[in-house]
Amino acid sequence: MRLSNLAASATLLATAASANAANIDFWYGNIGPVEVAIRAQCDAFNAAQSEHRVNCVGQGSYEVLMQKAIAAYRAKNAPILLQVLDAGTLDMMLSGAVEPVQDLLPEVKWDSYIAGARAYYETPKGKLFAQPYNASTLLFYTNKTELEKAGITKTPETWEEVIDAARKLKAAGSTCPFVTNAEPWAVFEQFSARHGLPIASKHNGYDGLDAEYVFNTTFVAKHLSNLVEWRNEGLVRLNPDTKGGNLNAAFSSGECAMVEASSGSYSTYTKAFEGKYEITVGMAPMYKGQERHNTLVGGASVYIMKGHDKAEIEGAKAFLNFLRQPAQQISFVAATGYVPVTNDVLDAIAKSPEAKSPKYATAAVGIESMSKPSTPDTRGIRLGSYIQFRQIWTEETQKAFAGQQTMQVALDNTKKRGDELLRRFQQTYKGVELP
């Protein structure tokens, strides 16, 4: 179903107006094609019934949304529905500001959610705190047209093959064989997960607030050092190295031939490539000899905030039920490149006449990547102040990419500063048990 048809078709389901209609607010943090898709869902919900009305308010980014939400909650005027990025999970669980979604919607078959999509947002006992929404994972994209010009006929699957292809591309005149934003989600968190590496002790914090960072002693340190060397060789480019200024623009324009990026970037790439280049989509590269584990779910989930009356809660539940509908998920996947979050939707796509359609290219491969064998260290990241930690990680590693310190020193510094964050967070929640 096309986005433009969602609101129109939904009006056929409209019901009589209710005297107890609730106006509810839903804050989200996306822009671009994803924002368009979110607003289409909001319009479709409002057109489908008249008992409730959802006001969907964009905040520009996940980080800005979190800051505004904290201030709004303290002022007792927070929205009832809040879209929170993966890194904010523990902060939300311990905030005392949210109602676990599984408690308010016990009738939902939550086990229908794909394990890889729910592990990040559930307690060790399996209770979901938030409803997975715009679920993404890391994928590997190539400009097949440019690779073939350089004599590369097989899509690389390992890092060794990626770099071999990069050398051939460079020899053929490419100024940007492979591009990365060098952000922690892609080159650190997803790398660690699929290679089965812990980021912190206590299984990345799932088993206690007394976790400590350990990533500076794992294979991820070697990979990040490799990225520095490959950049110096002209095989890997960072955002500032490109004409486009960021990996999405640089890959979309054809400047860069290979990229690791979110499944949510797919629609941007395909629109830009139309009539110019052919694209390939696959799982993120592994090092040879390493066993592949699951990649993490990215994107965000939706929380129900406390402090709202019964009518608002019913409205919030109705909207979440609407988002979960297969037709809504399928349209969202087609419009954005995000992956389905329930098994029935993946099955529906697979059985549909459009199963092989390019608009669903990320669905199967994304779920396959998230469904690889998992370990207690690949469920997700349950660490306090993790959004701030990502900022520290980026600050220190950028110094290494700039040649101001070695990557190992950068990671050692990040571990030290990160542990300080964890200890402050632990002190703040002293005596509080993980849910």
Image: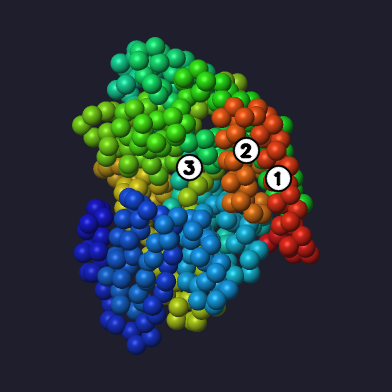
* Of 49 and 346, the residue lying toward us: 49
Lateral position of residue 146 relative to residue 261, left or right: left
Residue 212 location, x and y as percent? 74, 45
**If you read the primary sequence from the N terminus, does the residue marked by circle 2 or circle 1 appear first?**
2
Looking at the image, which residue is at 39% across and 51% down? 345
- Mark yes or no: residue 210 visible: yes
In the image, residue 146 sits, relative to residue 417, either above or below, namely above
Residue 322 location, x and y as percent? 38, 65
**Which type of secondary structure does the marked residue at label 3 adopt?**
loop
Residue 157 location, x and y as percent? 47, 24
Task: Check disc 2 and give the amino acid type.
Answer: Glu
Lateral position of residue 30 relative to residue 85, left or right: left
* Of 327 and 212, the residue lying toward us: 212
Q: Mark 2 points at which residue?
A: 396
Task: Check disc 3 and give the amino acid type.
Answer: Thr
Q: In which quarter of the image is the C terminus?
A: bottom right
* Dots 2, 1 in contact, CB < 8 A: yes
Q: Name the residue under label 3.
A: 137
Q: Mark 1 points at which residue?
A: 417
